[in-house]
C-alpha cells in the first residue's frame, strides 16, 4: 500500500474542514444575494443576517464587539489596511514615525517600506536570539511623532510568541496605536482585547482549516483609520467591495472548530518532534524553546541545504518548508533567521514543520525517520562536516 | 511532477554520479562558501602523460540545481583531456540537463566554476600555465564575480558592492561599499583574499570597507 502524503506546512495553508464547507454551502447556492439594508429584498436580508452573525462570532473570539471587526480578503490586506490606514489618518495630524520588528511578515515589512517611500520614517527593532522583542528598547524608540507600533503576536517561521500584553501596555502608556499581526495565533493562542491594550489585530481563516481569501481586522472603537480600498460603503465604510459572505460564514465556523484540546494535542506532537529532531547530530532549534506556537517546530541542520532537503522529503511524501535562499523566489535567505542573529549557513539548512488538525500522532515519527535519512544522505555528498 | 526542474535534472539530483572525495587527488578546488550559500568541491585524478582526466568526483553543499550540475559536468569531463574539459561551458551543461530555471543559474554556474578551478589548480601545481597574464583590474573584477554577497546570494560585482579596484606593484586594493562592522564583513574579506591571492603576480591583497 502506498503511504499517504503527510502535509506538515500548515503555517502556509491548511486543508478545508468539511464542516466549514457545509456551513458555507447555503451561502453559495441558496443565499447568494449581496447583503442589503433592512429595506432591501429578503435574500439580501438573509445574507445580511449571516454576515452579522459571522462577524459577531469571530469578534467574540477576540473579546470584541461586532462593530469593531471588519472583513478583508486575508491577513495581507488586513495588515496593509492597518499600517497604511493609520498612516493616512495620522501622518499629517500627529507624525510620520512607525515602529515594526525586523522579523515581521512581508505584509507588514513591505507596507512599512512603501510608507518610507512616501516620507514616513520606520524603525525596524531588533529581536534577541530567540526572536523576542526587547520591550524596554521599544519604549525608548517611541517619539512624539510615533503614530503606530506593529509587532506580530507570533512569528511565521520560527514560531516565537511576543509579549503582546507588555508591548500593548507601553504603547497605551505612550499614547501610540498598537497593531498586532495574529495570523498564526488566532484563535489558538488567546488574545482578549478587553485585557490586552491592542488597537488593531490582523486575523485570517486559511490557517485554521477555513477558506482562503477571507480574513479580518479588529479595529478598536475610536481608532483613527483611513479607508484604503475605495468603492462602496461596506464594512463600516472602511473596506469597499462586495462582501464575501460564504467566506465570512466559513471563517466563523473555522474559528468555532478550534478547540483547546486540539491545540494541546498539536503541542504534544510539536514537543516530541523537536525532541527527536534535536537528537540528529549538528542540529539546533530556531526560535524559543517554550514561548512558541503550539504547532511549530523549526530546526537547522548543518552541512546540508534546505531546498535539497525539501525535494527529497517531497519524494518521500512529506511537505515541509525552509528558510534557505535557494528556496525563496528572491534568492534571499530568511530575514527571520538572519534577524535572530543567524548566518546564511543556519538559514541554508533550516526546516520548518507546522501541524494542523488532520495530522496524526504517527506523522511525527514518520517525518523524523524520513528527514534523518535524507540528512544522512545529503551529508554524505557534502564537502562539509567530514573532519 | 509540477516542479520547476526538468526530469533530467531531477534524475541527476536523485542519483548524482561521481559523488564523493578522491583521497590524494592530483588537483582540487572549492567554489562558494557556507557563509554565502551553495558550495561545491571538485577533485581530479589526471594522467600526467596525456593530461587526460582519469577520475573526477564532486561534493555539494547546495540545492538541486547545484547537485545536478555537479553530476552532469563530472560525467561530461570524465575521460576528457584537460583542454577538452576546459572547453565545457555552463551553457552546454545546462542544455544536457534540459534547461534550468533562470533563478537557479547561479547555483549551477558554481558547479561549472568548480570544474574549471580544479583544472586551473592542476595546471598551476604542475607548471602548465602557459602564458602568465599580468593581473589587471579586469582580471580582479572577474575573480570578484565569484565572491558572493551573502546578503542577497548574488556576487559582489552584480550587487554593486565593489566600489573601487586598484592594482599596483603586486598589491591589489579592493574597496567595498559595506561598513566594516557588517555581519558578513569578515567572511567577504576572507573570500576575496582567497580568490585574489593565488594570482602569480599578486603579493598582497588589501580589502577596505566604507560606510
Image (spheres, coloured by chain):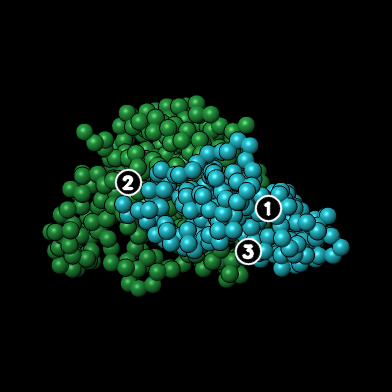
Question: CB under 8 Å between callouts 1 and 3?
Answer: no
Residue A45 appears anywhere in the view: yes
Q: Which residue is mark 2?
A: A14
Q: Which residue is mark 3?
A: B159
Disc 1: CA contacts within 10 A as few (<14), some (14-19) or many (>=20): some
Q: Have a look at marks 2 and 3 and say if they share a chain.
A: no
Q: Nearer the viewer, mark 1 or mark 2?
A: 1
Q: Residue at x 27, y 55 (%)?
A: A247
Q: Residue B35 vs residue A44: left or right? A: right
Q: Residue A363 vs residue B205: left or right? A: left
Q: Residue at x 48, y 53 (%)?
A: B76
Separation (CA) of disc 2 from disc 3: 37 Å
Quadrant position of residue A76:
bottom left
In the image, residue A27 sits, relative to residue A36, either above or below, namely above
In the image, residue A376 sits, relative to residue B118, either above or below, namely above
The hue in which chain A appears in the rendered picture of the protein:
green
Q: Which residue is mark 1?
A: B123
Q: Nearer the viewer, residue B7 or B4?
A: B7
Q: Nearer the viewer, mark 1 or mark 3?
A: 1
Q: Quadrant of the C terminus of chain A?
A: top right
Secondary structure beneath dot 3 equals loop
The hue in which chain B appears in the rendered picture of the protein:
cyan
Amino acid at each position: 500500500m502506498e503511504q499517504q502524503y503527510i502535509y506538515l506546512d500548515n503555517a502556509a495553508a491548511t486543508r478545508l474542514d468539511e464542516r466549514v464547507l457545509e456551513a458555507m454551502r447555503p451561502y453559495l447556492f441558496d443565499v447568494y444575494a449581496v447583503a442589503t439594508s433592512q429595506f432591501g429584498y429578503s435574500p439580501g436580508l438573509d445574507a445580511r443576517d449571516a454576515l452579522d452573525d459571522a462577524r459577531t462570532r469571530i469578534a467574540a473570539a477576540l473579546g470584541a464587539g461586532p462593530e469593531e471587526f471588519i472583513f478583508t480578503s486575508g491577513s495581507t490586506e488586513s495588515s496593509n489596511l492597518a499600517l497604511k490606514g493609520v498612516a493616512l489618518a495620522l501622518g499629517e495630524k500627529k507624525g510620520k514615525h512607525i515602529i515594526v520588528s525586523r522579523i515581521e511578515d512581508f505584509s507588514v515589512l513591505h507596507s512599512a517600506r512603501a510608507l518610507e517611500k512616501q516620507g514616513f520614517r520606520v524603525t525596524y527593532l531588533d529581536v534577541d536570539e530567540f526572536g523576542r522583542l526587547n520591550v524596554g528598547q521599544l519604549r525608548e524608540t517611541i517619539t512624539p511623532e510615533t503614530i503606530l507600533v506593529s509587532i506580530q503576536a507570533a512569528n511565521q517561521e520560527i514560531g516565537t510568541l511576543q509579549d503582546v500584553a507588555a508591548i500593548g501596555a507601553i504603547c497605551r502608556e505612550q499614547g501610540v496605536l498598537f497593531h498586532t499581526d495574529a495570523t498564526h495565533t488566532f484563535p489558538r493562542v488567546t488574545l482578549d482585547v478587553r485585557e490586552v491594550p491592542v488597537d488593531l489585530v490582523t486575523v485570517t481563516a486559511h490557517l485554521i482549516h477555513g477558506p482562503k481569501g477571507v480574513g479580518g481586522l479588529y479595529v478598536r472603537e475610536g481608532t483613527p483609520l483611513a479607508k484604503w480600498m475605495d468603492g462602496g460603503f461596506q464594512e463600516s465604510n472602511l473596506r469597499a467591495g462586495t462582501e464575501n459572505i460564504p467566506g465570512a460564514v466559513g471563517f466563523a465556523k473555522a474559528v468555532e472548530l478550534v478547540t483547546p484540546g486540539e491545540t494541546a494535542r498539536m503541542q504534544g506532537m510539536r514537543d516530541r518532534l523537536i525532541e527527536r529532531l534535536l537528537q540528529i547530530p549538528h542540529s539546533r532549534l530556531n526560535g524559543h524553546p517554550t514561548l512558541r506556537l503550539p504547532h511549530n517546530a523549526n530546526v537547522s541542520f548543518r552541512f546540508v541545504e534546505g531546498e535539497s532537503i525539501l525535494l527529497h522529503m517531497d519524494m518521500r511524501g512529506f511537505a515541509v518548508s525552509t528558510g534557505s535562499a535557494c528556496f525563496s523566489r528572491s534568492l534571499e535567505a530568511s530575514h527571520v533567521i538572519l534577524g535572530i542573529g543567524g548566518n546564511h549557513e543556519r538559514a541554508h539548512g533550516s526546516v520548518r514543520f507546522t501541524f494542523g488538525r488532520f495530522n496524526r500522532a504517527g506523522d511525527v515519527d514518520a517525518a523524523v525517520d524520513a528527514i534523518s535519512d535524507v540528512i544522512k544522505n545529503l551529508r554524505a555528498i557534502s564537502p562539509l562536516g567530514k573532519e | 511532477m509540477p516542479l520547476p526542474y526538468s526530469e533530467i535534472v531531477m534524475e541527476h539530483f536523485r542519483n548524482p554520479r561521481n559523488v564523493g572525495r578522491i583521497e590524494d587527488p592530483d588537483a582540487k578546488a572549492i567554489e562558494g562558501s557556507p557563509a554565502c550559500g551553495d558550495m561545491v568541491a571538485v577533485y581530479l585524478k589526471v594522467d600526467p602523460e596525456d593530461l587526460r582526466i582519469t577520475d573526477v568526483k564532486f561534493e555539494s553543499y547546495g540545492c538541486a540545481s547545484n547537485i545536478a550540475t555537479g553530476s552532469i559536468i563530472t560525467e561530461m569531463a570524465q575521460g576528457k583531456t584537460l583542454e577538452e574539459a576546459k572547453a565545457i561551458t555552463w551553457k552546454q551543461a545546462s542544455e544536457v540537463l534540459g534547461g534550468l530555471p533562470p533563478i537557479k543559474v547561479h547555483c549551477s554556474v558554481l558547479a561549472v566554476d568548480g570544474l574549471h578551478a580544479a583544472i586551473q589548480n592542476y595546471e598551476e601545481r604542475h607548471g602548465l600555465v602557459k602564458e602568465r597574464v599580468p593581473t589587471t583590474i579586469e582580471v580582479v573584477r572577474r575573480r570578484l564575480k565569484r565572491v558572493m554577497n551573502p546578503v542577497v546570494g548574488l556576487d559582489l560585482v552584480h550587487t554593486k558592492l565593489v566600489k573601487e579596484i586598484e592594482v599596483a606593484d603586486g598589491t591589489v586594493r579592493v574597496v567595498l561599499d559595506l561598513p566594516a562592522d557588517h555581519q558578513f564583513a569578515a567572511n567577504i574579506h576572507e573570500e576575496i583574499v582567497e580568490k585574489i591571492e593565488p594570482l602569480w603576480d599578486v603579493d598582497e591583497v588589501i580589502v577596505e570597507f566604507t560606510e
